[in-house]
Image (cartoon, rainbow, N blue to C red):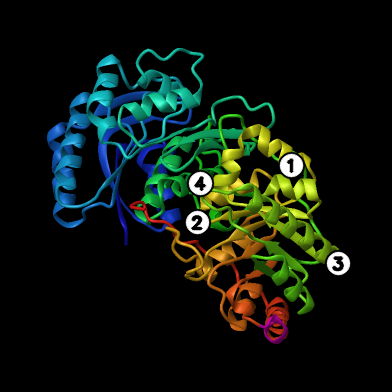
């Protein structure tokens, strides 16, 4: 099994610390090595005593594990003293001389009941020793302010995250469970190399919240250990923590422990949204829904091909004409004519037409919808996305990873494309094939219709995608030169797949490695 070390404190009440870490690791199916850095005497209402583990004994634990059970990821929790923190830093360096080891820091600077675990000397040790070595850090807002020297009480999570990143960790996730949420949503600020935004999900109504920070950090460490990139790991940690809150219980007269469980991975209501920037983009309208699925979905590059595919019986189409490096007036005129002609042809046939990329022209010329990639949507900015949503165009959004799925959900689109399902040569991309397992997970969890795209070259693949629950299957090369001869077989495969029982969703797999 994949090995994660948790270097943290014990909790005699069984709620937080290594107790919570163990439950989170079990939920992810990784093996946790619990390394005791501190011992606490506490119950559900208060921490009575904290004792740092002698450095010699902490070092001996790490030495023993390094000989036989080296970690893929190390997670730290309560360390209780600068000497213990320095010991951990030395071991991170030693292990990294032999292998890649990620470090997730949960800076436990105080307890939820009010006890403080860190003075200025400890804060300085974090800044000088641990944060420069950290892969990711998961503080709450109060902890972030204490760690960022000079931070004011009015500094928001995005600014604090930038301050923490300057200290070393590439990924910062500032958890917001302790902060007020007037709209009933808990928001965590994620700042990472590939994406930054608010991870938001409905607040779980419970007073039993002991161990949420430990659960989040260990879940993130476990997801990284399983090969998920940092952004996907944050989505999974958010889900696992929400699931743990749903299963929390009383174990004393105060706040009881949260209980992480593997079932979180197939609970659609736990999947968060991710905003596109600091402005907290939220869905402004309900996603478009139609009684009929999109079905066979042809992606073509000309009005002539639109007319050919319509004649073969396809009723969902996308016109994808890429912009050249130096578009001139003549190209712009040809583009408008191609879009105008395609719209007319689809209207006459009672078909739905999505325009790829050129959303302003799609609005101007009266197309049914537009399909945009995530980079294009991010480039629009808040005003552009608001204008797009208010236009009434049906919106299709590409997604290749869990964080892109979470971000697409925030705009309540007509559909979310999952791809590439199979390896594709249509365009170069860093993403690994999603496979039927990820497609099935997307369909079960997205909360919006899902379209399968990428590497679909046979009727059998169309049927497999349909059986996963896809609302549509994108067809490019499989249409061939004569769609009239290929479409009937593709349609039969689609119908058979839709009529088959949908397999239950399991765990998704990473579609992008951290190295990418």
Reply yes or no: does residue 424 show up in magenta.
Answer: no
Image depth: mark 2 or mark 3 in front? 3
Give the residue number, with chain letter if any, for mark 3.
Answer: 350
> What element does badge 2 sit on?
helix
Instruction: Count the numbered circles shown.
Output: 4
User: At which x and y percent is residue 30?
Assistant: 36, 56
Left or right of 135? Residue 295 is right
**Front-most of 372 and 98?**
372
Q: CA distance from mark 2 to mark 4?
A: 15 Å
Image depth: mark 2 or mark 4 in front? 4
Q: CA distance from mark 1 to mark 4?
A: 25 Å
Give the residue number, with chain letter if any, for mark 2.
Answer: 262
User: At which x and y percent is residue 243?
Assistant: 56, 47
Q: CA distance from mark 4 to mark 3?
A: 40 Å
Stretch in magenta: 482-486
Residue 18 occupies which quadrant of the picture?
A: top left
Residue 448 visible in the current orientation: no
Of mark 3 and mark 1, the one earlier in the sequence is 3
Q: CA distance from mark 3 to mark 1?
A: 23 Å
Q: Main secondary structure of the magenta part?
A: helix
In the depicted structure, whether residue 27 falls above or below residue 303: above
**Front-most of 374 and 34?**
374
Give the residue number, with chain letter if any, for mark 1.
Answer: 389
**Front-most of 444 and 304?**
304
Quarter of the figure that contains the N terminus:
bottom left
Q: 10 Å neighbourhood of mark 1: few (<14), some, or many (≥20)?
A: some
Q: Which circle marks residue 235 in the picture?
A: 4
Marks 3 and 1: CB-CB under 8 Å? Answer: no
Q: Residue at x 73, y 53 (%)?
A: 336
């Amino acid at each position: 099994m994949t090995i994660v070390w948790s270097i943290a404190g014990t909790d005699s009440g069984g709620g937080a610390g290594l107790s919570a870490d163990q439950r989170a690791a079990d939920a992810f199916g990784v093996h946790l090595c619990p390394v005791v850095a501190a011992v606490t005497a506490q119950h559900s209402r208060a921490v009575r005593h904290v004792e740092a583990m002698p450095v010699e004994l902490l070092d001996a634990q790490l030495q023993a594990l390094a000989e036989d059970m080296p970690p893929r990821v190390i997670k730290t929790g309560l360390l209780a003293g600068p000497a213990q923190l320095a010991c951990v830093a030395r071991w991170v360096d030693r292990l990294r001389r032999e292998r890649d080891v990620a470090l997730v820091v949960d800076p436990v600077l105080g307890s939820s009941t009010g006890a403080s675990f860190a003075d200025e000397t400890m804060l300085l040790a974090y800044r000088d020793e641990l944060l420069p070595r950290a892969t990711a850090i998961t503080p709450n807002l109060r902890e972030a302010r204490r760690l960022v020297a000079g931070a004011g009480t009015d500094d928001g999570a995005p600014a604090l995250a930038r301050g923490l990143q300057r200290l070393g960790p590439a990924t910062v996730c500032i958890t917001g469970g302790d902060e007020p949420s007037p709209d009933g949503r808990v928001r965590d600020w994620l700042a990472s190399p590939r994406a930054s935004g608010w991870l938001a999900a409905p607040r779980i109504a419970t007073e039993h919240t002991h161990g949420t920070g430990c659960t989040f950090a260990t879940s993130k460490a476990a997801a990284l250990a399983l090969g998920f990139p940092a952004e996907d790991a944050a989505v999974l940690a958010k889900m696992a923590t929400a699931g743990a809150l749903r299963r929390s219980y009383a174990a004393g007269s105060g706040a009881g422990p949260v209980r992480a469980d593997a079932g979180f991975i197939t609970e659609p209501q736990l999947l968060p949204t991710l905003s596109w920037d600091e402005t907290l983009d939220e869905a402004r309208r309900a996603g478009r829904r139609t009684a009929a699925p999109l079905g066979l979905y042809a992606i073509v590059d000309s009005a002539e091909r639109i007319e050919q595919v319509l004649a073969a019986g396809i009723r969902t189409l996308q016109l994808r004409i890429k912009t050249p490096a130096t578009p001139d007036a003549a190209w712009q005129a040809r583009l408008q004519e191609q879009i105008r002609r395609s719209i007319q042809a689809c209207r006459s046939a009672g078909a739905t037409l999505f325009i790829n990329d050129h959303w302003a022209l799609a609005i101007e010329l009266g197309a049914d919808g537009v399909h945009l990639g995530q980079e294009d949507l991010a480039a629009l900015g808040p005003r552009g996305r608001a204008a797009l949503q208010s236009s009434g165009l049906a919106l299709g959004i590409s997604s290749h990873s869990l964080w892109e799925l979470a971000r697409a959900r925030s705009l309540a689109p007509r559909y979310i494309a999952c791809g590439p399902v199979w390896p594709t040569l249509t365009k170069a991309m860093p993403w690994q094939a999603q496979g039927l397992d990820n497609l099935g997970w997307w369909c079960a969890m997205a909360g919006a219709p899902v379209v399968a795209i990428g590497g679909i070259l046979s009727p059998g693949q169309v049927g497999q995608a349909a059986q996963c629950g896809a609302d549509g299957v994108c067809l490019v090369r499989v249409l061939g030169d004569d769609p009239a001869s290929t479409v009937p077989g593709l349609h039969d495969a689609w119908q058979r797949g839709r009529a088959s029982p949908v397999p239950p969703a399991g765990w998704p797999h990473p579609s992008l490695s951290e190295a990418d």
